Amino acid sequence: MNNKDIFILLSLVSFIIDVLNTNCKMNSLYIYTNNLTHHFLIIYAVFGSLLFGHYRLHVLVILLTILGWLLFKYCILTLYYNRHCGIKDGEHHDNLIYNGIIQQLPSAIKSYYSIFVFILIYDVYNIYTE
């Protein structure tokens, strides 16, 4: 199995976990597409540089993700999804990253920001050692 296959598998598993564990009141092709896009993006944000390299691009993706969170308080895709599904703002997607990693962290560092700090350090290290 190559890295692209691993990426697609992780994204689809994360999406399926979310669909099975979330009671969305408005299921439509558009909502499923939004949700699937969210899972592909978060899996790339966390595992993209490990799977594909492209460290500069990955740093840009993470910084744009953080900027979006700061501007909208949450991921814009999650806000849209939650509002259309009748889920209150601030609720996280049931996904591999949140349930599988973040919930396992000590409470002092239990956030996407903590993971992104470590990933950014990894990316910057690799940029300067290329």
Image: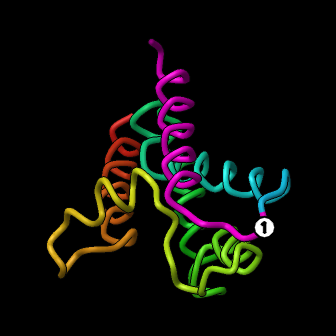
- Which amino acid does the dot numbered 1 rest on? Met
Residue placed at 43% from the left, 43% from the top? 47
Magenta span: predominant SS is helix
Query: Which corner quadrant of the image does residue 1 belong to?
Result: top left
Task: Indicate the position of residue 25 as horizontal and vertical percent values.
Answer: 72, 70
Q: In the orientation shown, which residue stands out farthest toward the left?
A: 106
Q: Height in image: 126 above or below 75?
A: above
Residue placed at 58% from the left, 80% from the top? 74
Question: Judging from the image, what secondary structure is the residue with disc 1 in?
Answer: loop
- Residue closer to the observer: 115 or 98: 98
Does the segment drawn in magenta span residue 82? Answer: no
Q: Quadrant of the C terminus?
A: top left
Q: Which residues are magenta?
A: 1-26
Asked if residue 8 lies left or right of residue 109, the reply is right
Q: Height in image: 1 above or below 114?
A: above
Asked if residue 27 lies left or right of residue 92, the reply is right
Q: Residues within 10 Å of mark 1 (few under 14, many from 20)?
A: some
Task: Indicate the position of residue 38 as horizontal and vertical percent values.
Answer: 63, 56
Task: Indicate the position of residue 124 as horizontal and vertical percent values.
Answer: 38, 52
- Residue closer to the observer: 48 or 38: 38
In the rendered view, how is the structure colored? rainbow
Residue picked out by circle 1: 26
Task: Indicate the position of residue 95 as horizontal and vertical percent values.
Answer: 46, 55
Residue placed at 53% from the left, 51% from the top? 20
Residue placed at 39% from the left, 68% from the top? 112
